[in-house]
Amino acid sequence: AGTVEFLLDGDGVFYFLEMNTRLQVEHPVTELVTGLDLVDLQLQVARGEALPVAQEHVELRGHAIEVRLYAEDTVNGFLPASGTASTWIPPAGEGIRVDHGLRPGLEVSPFYDPMIAKIIASGGDRQTARRRLLKALRDTVIFGLDSNRQFLIDVLERAAFADGLATTAFIEEQFPDGVSSPTPAAEDFALAAVLQSLEAESHSLVRRIRDDSAFTGARAQPSTYAYNDGDELCQVRVQARGEDRYAVDIGERQFDVRILERAAMGSLRIDLDGVQCNVASATHARGAISFQWRGRDFTLINELAFSAAERAGAGSGSVLAPMHGNVLAIRVAVGDPVSIGDELAVMEAMKMEHRLTASIDGTVSAIHGTEGEQIAAGALVLEIAASAAEPQKAGGANGG
């Protein structure tokens, strides 16, 4: 579980670099393939006892793979994230081990390493361990902060990883354009609308009224939602067709959604056009729904929850903190002219520095951040007034 590092030069000569005689983050992998509890063995040695097993008696059985579930924004250069875990459901099952100290309501702060949990899968061979780990990650539910759950799923699904061909250049080779969020499809919009319809029902004071031939009351009235789909709005119409059954119309397409089972903490088992799957969801802000299904994470915003003035937004001159952290430096002053790409400020969180740059040409009109100040993700750091040659464009509301 410790590491010994050497350097091999071009002449075939080894040079000693360092030795870490301590438990590493990956020690559960060693424990699962050897059957030895390394923590217990270390405590025995610390008490002056002899190791109960010799090296030649250590047998390796099967295979184990571990992933580190981190609070990080994979789309934004793997920046560390922080926040409060509103929902946390770790996976379980045959061959699955989870080491964590998280529970709903706890905060992942910017002051420590953002690792949330270690999820380890073991099996008789590598493919069994990989498939179990893939299912475990799909079953993992976390809301309230960004995580690399979906990225880990993407990695395990790649043929290069499945075939054992991953190298230290894996991310550059497999994600040449960087890691991006999944683009929602019609099924995702349909599910989002049903989830928001269910949320609206749960807050309604109107009782459900149903008989054998008709379904009346508030649920009988169709509901309409609108989500951003690129440069357009995707209109979704939801109509209740009976107890826990919905017809969803998106343009000329119609989906049949049935709620098969309701579990704790917002988890559902649904049937969408004859295909069953598990869904976990949470609401954190007006008009927004976050959900996990099919190994993918989405947060969609119903634009109809906002007025036209709210949807117009404040424009692109606001420079926001991309993460919780410390403002190390402010590089500009009010009145300074700036151009796209100019460095405006530097932030630090969890041993990482991030430079805030200008997204428009203009003049610094206000500075809200202070050097040495701890600020939250999304906090307004400074503002830029667009130059006359580069008029400021209004952006859409993000609902957050």
Image (cartoon, rainbow, N blue to C red):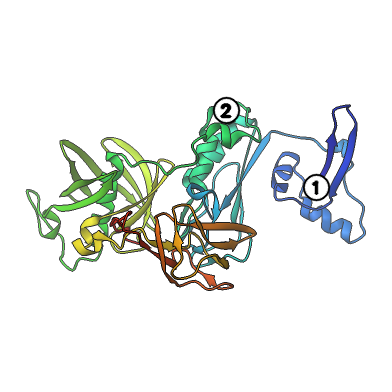
Q: Residues within 10 Å of mark 1 (few under 14, many from 20)?
A: few
In the picture of the structure, the residue carrying the numbered disc 2 is: 160
Determine which residue is flagged by label 1. 2
Q: Earlier in the sequence, mark 2 or mark 1?
A: 1
Pointer 2 local density, CA inside 10 Å: few below 14, some 14–19, many at least 20: some
Residue 55 in the image, given as x and y percentages of width and height: 88, 39
Q: Which mark is residue 262?
A: none
Across and down, in percent, residue 42 comes to: 83, 55
Q: Is residue 325 left or right of residue 231?
A: right
From the image, which quarter does the C terminus lie in? bottom left
The amino acid marked with disc number 2 is Ala
Identify the secondary structure beneath mark 2. helix
Q: Badges 2 and 1: C-beta atoms under 8 Å apart? A: no
**Furthest residue in direction left, as rendered:** 213
Instruction: Name the one closer to the observer, 299 or 55.
Output: 299
Q: Amino acid at mark 1?
A: Gly
Task: Tell me, yes or no, if residue 86 can be seen here.
Answer: no
Dot 1 lies on which element?
loop
